[in-house]
Amino acid sequence: EISSSCRVGHLKLMLLWLLLVRNINCARILVFQVSGAKSHTVVMEPLFEELASRGHQLTVFTCFPHKHPILNLKEIDLSHRWQRSVSNFSFGLIKEIMPNPFVTPIFMADVEFNMCERVLPDDQIKKLLESDEKFDLVMTETFSADCFVPFAHKFRAPLISFVTSSALPWVSERVGLPDNPSYIPNYLLDLSSNMTLYQRGYNLVVLMFAKLVHEYYAVPKSQTLVTQQYGFSSPSLYELVQNASLLFVNSHISLSQSRPFPPNVIEIGGIHINNPSQQLPKDLQHILDRSSQGVIVVSFGSLVQVSSIPQHVIQMFLRAFSSVPQTVVFKYEADLPETPPNVVIRKWLPQREILGHENVKALLTHGGSASTIEAVYFGKALIGIPFFADQYLNIKAIVARGAAIMLHLDNMSEHTIRAALHNIVNDPKYTENMRRLSQQFRDRPMTALQTAVYWTEYVIRHQGAPHLRPA
């Protein structure tokens, strides 16, 4: 009996020790991802889920909470504050405003400021501001405003910033990321790395304009709001963002030209493709399986209302789709009374799972980061019709590798769409080049998710890892 009691005692001590070790190694992490675009949330969700599965305690402010609770992941739903305000960009707005690189930075700053104005007064935010909770790390999505960054100062925690696209022009300076306009094309322009002298000059002008808008328009507005809303004094936003430990960017060297990266900028392109693929809905599975001529997927993302595209433009697309023998699966959030027999309309598509199907030949897309990366990952050739921001850069990069065809909104016609569809399917060079690019994209020592987890925990282990930041 004594021996048995000793064994039980030792067992209890061992369990207690394991619990203590687990608690020591597990951190409390505060996350702000208050983007109104579902595509932004999808990119970073796997990192938060993986950190939670490793025992870290996460509090995540989001507009798109999970449908079912996840252990160690507490989500604060802010969709009533912001989601509906930003997810209704019309086609007319996009076509009128976004292609202008001297308007886009101001528009983006206003959208972000509007978000901050709506979200910061929320009761859950105020409750957090008044709390004496402890956090070991704060993570924020950075776009045009940084209104959640002061939480890192309040909780005296390291800060990791992340962007769900490639690096933004106004973010480069804060992390010491070189953005030499002589060979690095601007996020906002339809340029490649091979620029003429005129294009380099234009690239420089737009780069400086974007940075000036951020520094003298976006930051002062955000600073005024933050000073009003936060109940504690903190350094300026400019100082706070300069102290970020890391910047995660949703890119990969295979998708852009070679450029110097400081050690505190980590590429995690493809992080959202690590989750095991879910089964396709039975009707879609059947459609894809029986499409012996192949499938072309058409999706313009989650930010722009495709139903706001004028009907004569939609009919132009449908006529072009009817000219190919392939099945065309078209994501369109409204009902269309008449469609060609080879066109399948769905209000929502599980895009990753569809692109993984062997019968899919190509993706017609707006060129968002997530969609572009998914096409590269699965080796599907692209037709890109960029709307705004980084979409031009994303598509241009794939065109430069011979794996995509790019169309422009201002001169697009039924003829150009039809020609692009026929060329992308019938010319094998596009698929061959994309498969080669896919191999380069996948060939890395760690997956994007493993990379993000490693560096997140590295910052926690080394109390912010200030040695990573350039002087």
Image (cartoon, helix red, strand yellow):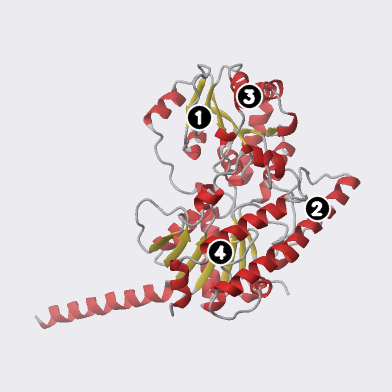
SS assignment at label 3: helix
Give the position of the C terminus as an image quadrant.
bottom right
Which residue is more in the foreground, 426 or 390?
390
Query: Which three-letter amino acid code belongs to the residue tagged 2?
Result: Val
The disc, 1 or 4, on the residue closer to the chain's N-terminal end is 4
Q: Dot 3 corresponds to which residue?
A: 312
Which residue is more in the foreground, 453 or 322?
322
SS assignment at label 1: loop
Real-space Cα separation, disc 1 to disc 3, in angstroms: 33 Å
Q: Which of the 4 image quadrants contains residue 419?
A: top right
Q: Dot 1 corresponds to which residue?
A: 358
SS assignment at label 4: strand
The disc, 1 or 2, on the residue closer to the chain's N-terminal end is 2
Q: Dot 4 corresponds to which residue?
A: 140
Query: Which three-letter amino acid code belongs to the residue tagged 4?
Result: Thr
Q: Dot 2 corresponds to which residue?
A: 206
Seen from this angle, which residue lies furthest bottom?
A: 2
Query: Which three-letter amino acid code belongs to the residue tagged 3?
Result: His
Query: Which three-letter amino acid code belongs to the residue tagged 1?
Result: Glu
